[in-house]
Image (tube, grey):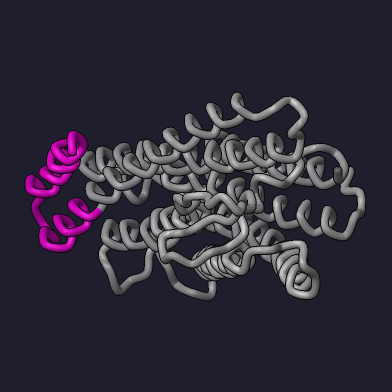
Amino acid sequence: RHLWPLAWGFGAMGLSRTGDEQDARLGTWLLAVVMVCFAIVSVRCALEIRLLRKKMLREQEGATKSRSGIEMRMWFHGLLLLGNSTRGIAVGIELILWHAGMCPASLSCTQVRVFPNLFFLSTYSLLTLFWAQLTYQVMNVQFLHLRSLFFGGNALLYTAYFVLTAIAHTMKSMSAQYFEFAMADLLGGFYLVVLLFLLYFGPKVAIHFRQTEEVTSAEMLSRLVALCVLCAVIITMHVVYFLVSGSRVVHWELGYPMWVGDRTFDALAFFLLELGPSLAILSTMHRRKATTSPGGTAKNANNAWVPASPSALDRQPLRGQAE
């Protein structure tokens, strides 16, 4: 509740503008509200990391799988925290640049809008790494190079961003529009690769668990499938958005369509591509509070009795090979 006055202050910037006032004011208020929502999600991720750290300290030294799974979840929430916090900061800077008349034509405005996309892409690529590790673990196959592929791909992504940024600042011929096009094509291509990996590993895990009795809880299996489907839908949305906005065939000026205000479009895009998916994934991964009966079964909120079993994310090793 202490963050809403901040949104009010940024939103008030739109009241001092003249010209296309109605669209500008609406877009400014929407961006301010979205900025506060990103801050709230960031706080939620930070609290989850704190809880996971305490839980890992309570785990026994021999519980390698459980500790590795908690480590994986901490990595995920850490990247999601970076994505949401940097987007919230970027939206605040973008509002200031809009007020100063530097958006959307300046290169600085474009770079501020693009940079948080890197952390969200890293977050979804980490989830794909989880599915790949889970696939090889249940198949009892080593996966020595998955982490190297994950870190190498992300290093290539960030290097490409900084190289394009350096080129844009040193070569005056590269305008903000060309930088936007280049980054949209780059992000769209990386998201497409992540989607292909997810579509390969995700169904294999679901089919394996359906054909075996390794997952004793139907709720756990349904949650795994729901997480896979949700990630596939989110990544597909990113692929379509970036490839369409980066295509010169579609006449978008600086990534904006012509049928909606620039600030309003940014607010809607940030909500549909980043804020909404972050909330959906956090909700899917969040454990239900359960009570354990003397017989070793867990009773969930719906009074349905299912075998007590750790979350699938808590059973995945983050080591070089399967346990």
The one nearer the camera, 225 or 111, is 225
Residue stretch in magenta: 1-30
Camera sees residue 267: yes
Question: Is residue 262 toward the left or the right of residue 318 in the image?
Answer: left
* Quadrant (top left, top right, bottom left, bottom right) of the N terminus: top left
Say if the magenta span includes residue 23. yes
Q: Nearer the viewer, residue 157 or 151?
A: 151
Q: Residue at x 53, y 52 (%)?
A: 293
Image height check: is 212 above or below 180? below
The C terminus - image quarter: top right
Drawn side of residue 36 relative to residue 56, left or right: left
For the point 35% across and 41% down, the residue is: 88
Please state which of residues 192 and 77 is positioned toward the viewer in this rendering.
77
* Main secondary structure type of the part rendered in magenta: helix
Magenta stretch contains residue 100: no
Q: Position of residue 160 (x, y in %)?
A: 66, 43
Residue sticking out furthest to the right = 141
Q: Residue at x 41, y 60 (%)?
A: 301
Q: Is residue 281 left or right of residue 312?
A: left
Q: Quadrant of residue 56?
A: top right
Q: Is residue 179 visible?
A: no
11 vs 56, left or right, is left
Residue 127 image point, x, y percent: 64, 52
Q: How many marks?
A: 0
Residue 38: x percent and y percent?
35, 45
Task: Single out the residue that lies furthest toward the front.
Answer: 294
Which of the 4 image quadrants contains residue 27? bottom left
Residue visible at 68% across and 41% down in the picture: 69
Residue 146 in the image: state x and y as whole percent.
82, 47
